[in-house]
Amino acid sequence: MRYPYLLFDHDGVLVDTEYWYYEATRRALAPLGITLDRQAYQQIMVQGRAAWELAEQAGIDERRIAAQRRLRNSWYQEFLRTRDIEIDGVRELLGRLATRHRMAVVTTARRVDFELIHRERDLLATMEFVLTREDYRQAKPHPEPYLLALQRLGARPEQALVIEDSERGLRAAVAAGIDCAVVHNDFTAGHDFSTASYRLQTLAGLADILRS
């Protein structure tokens, strides 16, 4: 088997949350006089930076930024509770893949958000472990998250396949020496995916790659 280990990004791959994180951040920055359009947000995201740097660069007081950041977190969690973020077929696909592969989730999401998403969803039973933002020092596009996952699994880079939806995640996988399959996501469709090993229109296409 070419890829006995599968490492899944989370937001935009297993659940449809990318837009709602952006929207919560955009709303929170607006009262600070910061207009965050999608293009600017995407550029920040690819570089692994935080949108709050825009407020810092504008000289806004740290306490105001912290207050709006808390508000963003609250709005985002409200979106997670009230919006339809499930992706059709994901649960069934993971169940099938788990019969032949060892799998884990590697995400930049905060653990509190991750746990809220999965409180009433049965998507994680097939995963050996989950790495959230609190589990590593340097976030994607740095390779540390994926290197840590390999270490946990006792796997070599060539034995694993990363499944991502963003350029930031792709860059992290490539830097870790791991092949990467990029799943189409409308929110990240404009990213540069030229270094991806595979391109998928939907996550269901992953099964075809693994059979080949």
Image (cartoon, rainbow, N blue to C red):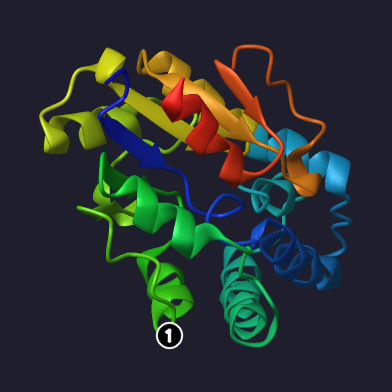
Q: Residue at x 63, y 64 (%)?
A: 88
Pinpoint residue 160: horizontal percent, then vertical percent.
31, 25
Residue 22 drawn at (x, y percent): 73, 59
Q: Which residue is mark 1?
A: 120
Q: Position of residue 99 (x, y in %)?
A: 25, 48
From this view, report whether residue 99 is shown above or below residue 163.
below
Q: Name the residue located 39 percent from the left edge and 83 percent from the top edge.
A: 119
In this rendering, the answer to whether 92 lies above or below 44 is below
Measuring from the top left, give residue 57's x and y in whole percent: 72, 44
* Residue occupying image coordinates x 40% and y 67%: 123
Binning the other alpha carbons within 10 Å of mark 1 as few (below 14), some (14 to 19) or many (20 upward) gives few
Look at the picture and state if 20 lies above or below 56: below
**Quadrant housing residue 121:** bottom left
Q: Is residue 66 above or below residue 5?
A: below
Is 161 left, or right, of 37 in this rendering?
A: left
Q: Secondary structure at mark 1?
A: loop
Q: Nearer the viewer, residue 53 or 123?
A: 123
Q: Nearer the viewer, residue 31 or 19?
A: 19
In this orientation, which residue lies closer to the viewer: 38 or 179?
179
Q: Is residue 38 left or right of residue 197?
A: right
**Label 1 amino acid?**
Glu
Of all residues shown, which one is farthest toward the left?
154
